[in-house]
Image (spheres, helix red, strand yellow):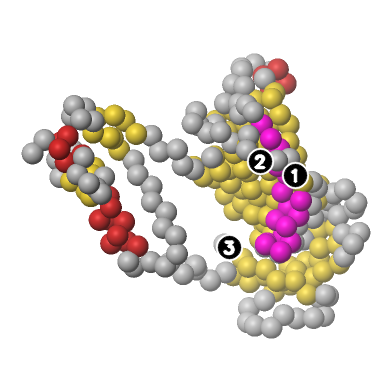
Amino acid sequence: MTRGAKYYTPRAIRLYKDDDTVINVADKIDQMSSRLDGDLTVQLSGSIVTQDGESLKVQEMGREVVTILPRTLRSTGTYLDVDIPRWAKGMQVIACIYGATGTFASGEGINVRVRNSLPLSGSNALTLGLLQDVKSDKYTGGTNTNTGCIIHPDVKSVSSTFSSVRNFNIKAVESLLLGRKSRVEVEINGTFSAGQGFDLEIYAVFM
Amino acid sequence: MNYEYIETESQEVVPEGDGWEFWGMRITPEESVAVWRRIAADPVE
């Protein structure tokens, strides 16, 4: 049987693996959903077989999570330059704060800063190529709280604390243009005794 | 080593449960809390 005939079988979306074995997507979903309650999220990648038997490459347009800073105790700031995937429309940077100690005056604490920029080179690259400079509000954190920034063309600008969820302190901005590089920075100030600070980890989610 | 944390009103108020050690205070213009920590259990797979 030709691939084209199989491809148009009613109710079936069929994928062909390299060894010509067939995966019937509808059947797979039925099998999986029978074991689950609620919504089912399915992600596919590979290629689409056309009527002519040609393969069209499929690129998953999902999400990618990058660890910016592994879990660590910090009392000073740090940064990392991150390459942005070409498919990404937006990004979220989130600092997950497990616990925090120290003494903080007004305006001190922790915030996440994202400088969205073009991939220029040289000492002035971050200034010349800068598209946006986003900072979350200064935050003194607490046990099991988050803070971070969202840059995405489909979100409305907002700066809020969603305490009903998980003390989520977020700064979001609209962006029509996401650059190809971002400097992701955590800024920390306060007075810390030995062994004190923020026990945190930082992630970037590209969308 | 990963820790889990809990807060109490002061260092004199010890949290319930085993293994908590006093880590320090978190003092801001709005509040002053005692922060305790203990080694976190491995997450359930």
Q: Is residue B19 above or below residue A20?
A: below
Gap between marks 2 and 3 measured at Cα: 34 Å
Gap between marks 1 and 2 measured at Cα: 8 Å
Q: Chain of mark 1?
A: A
Q: Is residue A196 visible?
A: no
Horizontal and vertical percent for residue A155?
A: 66, 41
Q: Is residue A177 above or below residue A2?
A: above
Gap between marks 1 and 3 measured at Cα: 33 Å
Q: Chain of mark 3?
A: B
Q: Residue at x 42, y 68 (%)?
A: A37
Mark 3, other Cα within 10 Å: few <14 / some 14–19 / many ≥20: few
In the image as oriented, which residue stretches furthest toward the front?
A10
Q: Is residue A39 magenta?
A: no
Dividing the image into 4 quarters, which one contains the C terminus of chain B?
bottom left
Q: Nearer the viewer, residue A176 or B34?
A: A176
Which amino acid type is marked by label 1? Val
Circles 1 and 2, Cβ within 8 Å, touching? The answer is yes
**Residue named by callout 1:** A158
In the structure shown, which secondary structural element does the residue marked by tag 2 occupy? loop
To the question of a shared chain for discs 1 and 3, the answer is no
Circles 2 and 3, Cβ within 8 Å, touching? The answer is no
In the structure shown, which secondary structural element does the residue marked by tag 1 occupy? strand
Q: Is residue A37 left or right of residue A3?
A: right
From which residue to which does the magenta span run?
A: A160-175
Which amino acid type is marked by label 2? Val
Q: Is residue A106 left or right of residue A50?
A: right
Circle number at residue A155: 2
Q: Residue at x 73, y 36 (%)?
A: A134
In the structure shown, which secondary structural element does the residue marked by tag 3 occupy? loop
**Residue named by callout 3:** B2
Circle number at residue B18: none
